[in-house]
Image: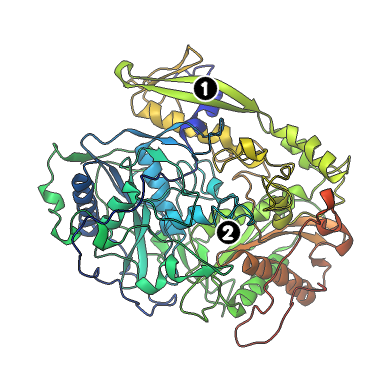
Amino acid sequence: MGRSPFHGLLAGFCLALAACSGGSNSGSTVGTAPPTNPPPGSTDSGCSGSCGNAQSFLSEDDVRKVIAQGVAEARAQGRPATFVVVDRVGNVLAAYAMAGAPPTVKVSSGRGVVGGLEGLDVPAEFAAIAKALTAVYFSSEGNAFTSRTAGQIAQEHFNPGDRTAPSGPLFGVQFSQLPCSDISARFTSGTGAGPHRSPIGLSPDPGGIPLYKAGVPVGAVAAAGVDDTYGLDDNAGDRDRNLDEYAALAATYGFAAPQDRRADRITAGGLTLRFTDVEFSELARDPATAPAFASLTPADGALLRVPGYADPVVLRGLALGTVESGIRPDTTDYPGLDAFVLDDGSGTNRYPPRAGTDGAAALNAAEVRTIVQEALKVAARTRAQVRKPLGSRAGETVVVVDTNGAVLALARSRDALVDAVDVTTQKARTAAFFSGTYTAGDIALSPTARYLRAALNLGAGRVDLFTVAQSAPAAYVPLLRGFLGLPQAWSDGQVAYSLRTIGNLSRPFYPDGVPGTPPGPLSLAFARWSPFQDGLELDLVYNQIAAHVAFYLNQKGLALTLDGVPAAPAPTPADPIPVPDVGRNCTGIPRLPNGITLFGGGFPIYRGNVLVGGVAASGDGTDQSDLVAFLGLHNAGVALNTGVGNAPVNLRADKLVPSGARLSYVQCPQSPFLNSTEQFVCEGK
């Protein structure tokens, strides 16, 4: 099979179509539906992490019912939609497009920003997959979050609309679960061990809602195309009439999240989180009366083939905790800790503790195992931030990597969030990467991001791509050096950067949340910034996300042109894959195969003064994740007495005070532990 010389340039385009995620608004809420009875199973279940079992999955009939209910509401709204149902570990169980559903939605933050993903047309099924994965990956027995919740906690202000507030606790999370990740699994047909990748990252767009059975999250459903914008809600102080959310909520009838676990019953930083801006009583019709899926005809719509994700069939889901799901209990490396590990689907732990790959000072397997064990012990004592019932322990994922980015171990608490598998690995790698002597040189390896606009010419059977801008990741190196006043930063290894530090440097305001101030050196200025165009984080991964979208559109039978020149023909029987799917490196940098992230919970690991890796935690509040990773590493160092531990105090980034505002390194909760009055437990360590 031949390959076009323009294939490499397509990488830039796809990101155009492959965006993060977002939401669209369609005016104020109007209640037009007759009241419905309380959704079955929506009362408080009393589950706190141990209710899930081998029967906690969506059956094929469950999936059909969910889709049929969503279709009925979309039809009642007069707006055909595309629906996707996923299971707990991200298998696409069905994708269904109503007749007349828009094939794409447009990415927009509503701020008039140009570049990045802004203004791009995203395949509606990609938008729906991203929203559904976000909802299920961010939910547990202790908390039910939606893609609207994700959007609320990932923007430049928390709450969105409060222009003097600092950024959300998950700022930057939208560029996780990427299609090029080496951590997220791939399964193109049927179901398989997860967690699975997202085509365009995680989503802040309303319209993705988790599905529960007997108090246990078993999947999620999302609608896309009822609203024509793929954006976000930038004002948490009002209610929006988002029609994607109406259709998705109707689809959850009979599988609704327990009321007491919904995001709007949970607070973070003293602020109530958002679940949906619509209730069942406001729907256009009672979902309990929706016609059965079997009654739908080709005139109503059809199941979709989604190359790289699903065949046009309905599947049953997998139950989290089983070997086949890819997440199962472990008693071998973490006895007595109620730990879970990633499995390849055949009973083999994908990431058992092992020695580092980076030289004489490398971590050995016993040290790696001890670091993870001590971090899990801290998590077991820690009071959860975003989980019910009150008094629950934190659910965290812990990852250790070496300076080459190799994963040396990964383990998680029972009922920890599934999104943390990929994002915690990003955190550990980010901390190790930015603290090394190789950082500037490695960033120079990452190709220039080529941002494009895409025009779908369905009549001609092609997509026309046009270059609109370019951005080189290497350009951020001199910006950082000038900002910090350190001419050799990222080359001399004289500063240890935590995730909280990198987050400080990546906000569109510095200090964080102070409007009118210049941006951090790894961010764009606010006039050019949005969650879909945010600076170094996106520049590092844009090309590969874009290439994945190009692969997808090509597999759907569309030829591709780039700046007016033919770039790839439509597939034929003789050459069925003219554009291949992306590989397992998002950045071109071996140490950062799944990209970076920008919120707290990751720290470099040192042996004395020598950098040997990174450790991270994620899952139950950013301060809690800082605590688990930082204190877990400290406790492991005490137990091991081999010189392994946190960065020497004189190297930590909080010694730096750029622009008159000190950088942060670690921030732990003041009174973090259950059944204990201990305070300030990270101080002096």
Answer above or below: position of 298 versus 248.
above
The quadrant of the picture occupied by the N terminus is: top left
* The quarter of the displayed image where residue 656 is located: bottom right
| Residue that appears at 35% across and 77% down | 44
Q: CA distance from mark 1 to mark 2?
A: 34 Å
Q: Mark 2 falls on what kind of element?
A: loop
Picture coordinates of residue 188, whole percent (x, y): 37, 42
* Left or right: 247, with 210 as reference point: left
In front here: 527 or 313? 527
> Residue at label 2?
351
Q: Position of residue 176 (x, y in %)?
A: 54, 48
Mark 1 or mark 2, whichever is nearer to me: 1
Three-letter amino acid code of the residue under disc 2: Tyr
**Residue 418 seen in this snapshot:** yes
Would you name the residue on which mark 1 appears?
A: 7
Q: Quadrant of the C terminus?
A: bottom right
Task: Residue 629: name its quadrant.
Answer: bottom right
Image disc number at residue 359: none
- Furthest toward the left, the residue is 295
Q: Residue at x 84, y 42 (%)?
A: 491
Q: For residue 382, what is the image quadrant?
A: bottom right
Residue 52, above or below 183: below
Nearer to me, 567 or 268: 268
